[in-house]
């Protein structure tokens, strides 16, 4: 029996339409790229590509607008939820999401994110927790673990003087206006699959007009952690997950009927 | 008297450190000196360069369009800097990294197989030192001894055991 | 003390520490971050206060609080971060407190880029915050000068109960030069009578910028202005190069000033009599010196890394007495000596216009300059 070539070829992996076909500037191994892909796949699957406005933040993902094939605006450091509010209030039938790092969202932008969630703003927030400030060269972030060395906590984060890390998913879950607040991780295939399901759910929340949704993604920064990508994945598993447990911190009851 | 030297290559080739060594040596020799790096996101794995100006009087601009000498560690840097070297200046080329020759006839071109030499000496990362040797042999700016002393003083402690090899790298480079 | 090869940002940080800095508050931003990182290692080691704030907004208000205690305090940032500090700056000025701010300028407006620029001139020199106040602005052009002016900044801040800004651009922050650091000063132990320190037995002190009663606010405004007049009378600083017999004067501060120095020397080598005036204090501005220049030279060239923010101050002093020309690279580009030399040659060889605005003439030349 001979097998003809076309039968051998089965496309199992293509670029989502919601991603542009350019090479990203992210460091080799960095999971910002994975997070981008998951968001793009979800936008494709939900047919939202042409009805979406993204809001880029300030951090390594500042150039996200180059990678998503959707309209994009770019916010000042930390202000993406406010800008997203502006867009959403004018265009309530569009899908609006922000993509923010931990310095951006949980430090300088803590006011805006809490206020947007408290208002029940009908936007989706993709929150990348990589335990440091990537873009500026690895300084301490609000998510930096106790004892973790960074370029601005050279002796390890000392909680006595530098405080404790912020658990954003738990924090935002306490607010009435939040409909969906969960934490996932990008460190292994199972985690990535779960992350995608959560991102899908978050956008479903927005589609149904249920209010504020946020997905926190534990993400690696091999460059500033000074590790190979593989070791960085292990580091998430060994160090980050015990401190930042994966899970659902708030899920709107109406999501029970959403099957993903 | 003023000399301007640009050192250019990929990040990770020790381009910035080579420039700093020149600056330390110039300072120790009592000269005026400035060292200025390219900085920014492009440093992540991309190209890196620094400009070192060494002079006898207060230095004006730390950046110049037409440097007296250029140390080129990769092809993009050759494309960029070959046309810019001052007439009569020096271009030291890491021939292990760059597949093409140099067209200009009005400058001194020094071809140094810096990677090969560095590997022979035990560590490819010393290619920058070989290149420095190549420069000092053709540009009267600092004595080789001054660089060796700067190396001794400023090589990070964890690399001090590589000092003799680094000094040999400079000396090997200066034979070209 | 011997000279060391120091990066501008690090040199400023260490100079501040040696000048008796007691508390530092900051937030990472390129091209200033090395300053914060140096503080994060050194201040705790010395038992002094260091906080990486949640934002520049946090940082400037931490400075506000610490300044109320009479301590030597400082923050540092770069253009977008400094924009965010403007509210706090106005409050600190309104409360008449000493503080030091380092602004390592980068390209803008908005997020812009991280390359060197001088486009914060207006927001720093002419006030970006609300109300009538002045910041004392020091503009170094070398690492040594950055060290010296940082030390001076603390003394001037306390002497005049004012904010002093050390204003430099990203290239000076990133550049290494030999510089001599000052010896370590002991921390201060005596505090001014206005400081709110919760000292047992002391009379009560209240520090605020609120004067609900307009006549009271007027009194405060006049007091602040009178103090500023003293600054204007005593603290003007500038540096002159080759001006004795100059027919063309270049005016530039910080990095543009030192690039212009190279150009001026090259022009001299061609026989063109050029000199340079480099303002070191941008506020107070060396108005008298510029006025005097307008009487001694045939023309003036202003060089900046912004679209002519200082130019307006020079024009105000020159009052049309001699032609003024303008040259700049903007958006994060550092001018090169040969570009400025070309301008000098042009001025030396062509009749100059006194009609229209120098910025408009420069803007017309920009397409060729950018090509
Ligand atoms: C007002 C203001 N302050 C500071 C900065 C400098 N800055 C740029 S990116 C960044 C940190 C980003 O870190 P994070 O949000 O954790 O994202 P990551 O780079 O790690 O993805 C900072 C502080 C800025 N651009 N604007
Ligand atoms: S610095 Fe870190 S977060 Fe930024 S692209 Fe590189 S690995 Fe990713």
Image: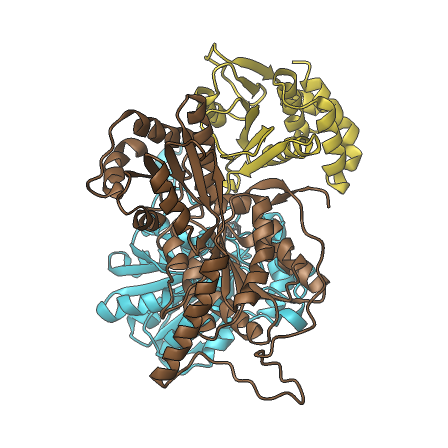
Give left or right: position of A178 versus A219: left
Classify residue B20 by image quadrant: top right
Q: Any idea which chain is the cyan one in this picture?
A: A
C371 in relation to C168, above or below: above
A115 in relation to B75, above or below: below
Give left or right: position of A85 versus C26: left
Q: Position of residue C369 (x, y in %)?
A: 31, 32
- Residue placed at 70% from the left, 72% from the top? C189
C143 or C332, nearer to the observer: C143
Classify residue B112 by image quadrant: top right
Classify residue A148 by image quadrant: bottom right
C228 in relation to A117, above or below: above
Rendering colour (chain B): yellow
Q: Position of residue A252 (x, y in %)?
A: 39, 79
- Residue placed at 50% from the left, 25% from the top? B67
C91 in relation to C108, above or below: below
Q: In the rendered view, how is the structure colored?
A: by chain
Q: Position of residue A95 (x, y in %)?
A: 29, 65
Q: Which residue is situated farthest in the top direction here?
A: B105
- Residue placed at 67% from the left, 19% from the top? B173
Rendering colour (chain C): brown
Q: Position of residue C326 (x, y in %)?
A: 31, 39
The quarter of the image holding the C terminus of chain C is: top left
B39 or A159, nearer to the observer: B39
Q: Which residue is situated farthest in the left direction here?
A: C355
Question: Visible in this render: residue A234?
Answer: no
Question: Visible in this render: residue C335?
Answer: yes
C148 or A11, nearer to the observer: C148
């Amino acid at each position: 029996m001979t097998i003809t070539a076309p039968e051998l070829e089965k496309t199992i992996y293509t670029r989502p339409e919601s991603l542009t076909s350019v090479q990203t500037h992210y460091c080799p191994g960095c999971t910002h790229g994975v997070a981008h892909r998951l968001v793009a796949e979800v936008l494709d699957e939900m047919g939202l590509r042409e009805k979406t406005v993204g809001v880029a933040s300030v951090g390594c993902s500042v150039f996200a607008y180059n990678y998503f094939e959707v309209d994009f605006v770019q916010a000042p450091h930390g202000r993406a939820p406010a800008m997203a509010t502006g867009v959403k209030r004018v265009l309530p039938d569009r899908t609006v999401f922000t993509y923010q790092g931990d310095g951006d969202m949980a430090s300088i932008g803590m006011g805006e994110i809490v206020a947007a969630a408290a208002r029940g703003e009908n936007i989706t927030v993709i929150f990348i927790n990589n335990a440091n400030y990537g873009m500026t060269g690895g300084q301490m972030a609000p998510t930096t673990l106790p004892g973790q060395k960074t370029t601005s906590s050279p002796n390890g984060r000392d909680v006595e003087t530098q405080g404790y890390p912020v658990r954003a998913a738990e924090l935002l879950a306490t607010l009435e206006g939040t409909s969906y607040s969960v934490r996932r991780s990008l460190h292994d295939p199972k985690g990535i699959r779960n992350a995608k399901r959560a991102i899908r759910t978050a956008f479903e929340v927005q589609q149904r007009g249920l209010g504020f949704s946020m997905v926190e993604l534990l993400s690696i920064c091999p460059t500033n952690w000074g590790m190979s990508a593989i070791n960085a994945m292990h580091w998430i598993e060994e160090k980050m997950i015990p401190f930042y447990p994966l899970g659902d911190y708030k899920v709107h009851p109406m999501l029970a009927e959403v099957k993903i | 008297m003023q000399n301007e030297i640009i050192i250019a290559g990929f990040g990770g080739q020790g381009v910035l450190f080579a420039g700093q060594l020149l600056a330390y040596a110039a300072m120790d020799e009592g000269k005026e000196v400035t060292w200025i790096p390219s900085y920014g996101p492009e440093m992540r794995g991309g190209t890196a360069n620094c400009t070192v100006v060494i002079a006898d009087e207060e230095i004006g601009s730390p950046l110049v369009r037409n440097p007296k000498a250029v140390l080129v560690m990769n092809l993009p840097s050759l494309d960029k800097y070959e046309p810019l070297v001052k007439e009569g200046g020096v271009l030291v080329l890491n021939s292990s990294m760059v597949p093409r020759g140099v067209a200009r006839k009005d400058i001194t071109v020094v071809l140094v197989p810096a990677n090969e030499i560095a590997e022979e000496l035990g560590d490819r990362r010393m290619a920058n030192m070989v290149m420095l040797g190549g420069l000092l042999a053709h540009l009267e700016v600092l004595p080789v001894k001054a660089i060796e002393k700067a190396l001794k003083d400023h090589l990070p402690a964890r690399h001090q055991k590589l000092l003799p090899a680094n000094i040999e790298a400079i000396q090997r480079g200066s034979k070209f | 003390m011997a000279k060391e090869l120091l990066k501008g940002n690090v040199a400023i940080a260490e100079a501040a520490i040696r000048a008796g800095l007691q508390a530092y508050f900051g937030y990472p931003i390129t091209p200033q971050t090395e300053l914060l990182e140096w503080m994060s290692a050194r201040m705790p080691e010395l038992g002094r206060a260091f906080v990486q704030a949640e934002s520049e907004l946090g940082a400037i208000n931490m400075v506000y609080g610490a300044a109320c205690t009479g301590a030597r305090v400082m923050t540092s940032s770069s253009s977008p971060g400094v924009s965010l500090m403007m509210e706090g700056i106005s409050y600190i000025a309104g409360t008449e407190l000493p503080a030091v701010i380092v602004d390592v300028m980068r390209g803008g407006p908005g997020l812009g880029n991280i390359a060197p620029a001088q486009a914060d001139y207006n927001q720093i020199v002419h006030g970006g915050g609300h109300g009538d106040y002045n910041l004392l602005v020091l503009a170094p052009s070398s690492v040594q000068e950055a060290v010296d002016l940082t030390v001076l900044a603390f003394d001037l801040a306390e002497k005049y109960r004012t904010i002093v800004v050390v204003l430099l651009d990203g290239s000076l922050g990133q550049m290494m030069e030999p510089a001599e650091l000052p010896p370590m000063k002991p921390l201060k132990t005596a505090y001014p009578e206005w400081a709110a320190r919760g000292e047992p037995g002391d009379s009560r002190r209240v520090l605020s910028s609120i004067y609900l009663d307009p006549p009271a606010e007027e009194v405060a405004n006049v007091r602040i202005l009178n103090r500023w007049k003293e600054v204007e009378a005593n603290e003007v600083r500038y540096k002159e190069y080759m001006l004795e017999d100059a027919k063309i004067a270049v005016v530039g501060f910080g990095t543009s000033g030192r690039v212009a120095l190279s150009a001026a020397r090259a022009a001299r080598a061609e026989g063109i009599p050029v000199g340079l005036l480099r303002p070191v204090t941008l506020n107070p501005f060396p108005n008298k010196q510029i006025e005097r220049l307008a009487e001694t030279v045939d023309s003036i060239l202003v060089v900046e890394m912004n679209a002519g923010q200082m130019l307006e101050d020079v024009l105000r002093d020159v009052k049309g007495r001699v032609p003024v020309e303008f040259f700049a690279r903007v958006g994060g580009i550092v001018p090169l000596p040969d570009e400025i030399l070309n301008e000098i040659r042009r001025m030396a060889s062509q009749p100059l216009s006194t009609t229209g605005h120098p910025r408009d003439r420069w803007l017309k030349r920009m397409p060729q300059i950018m090509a």
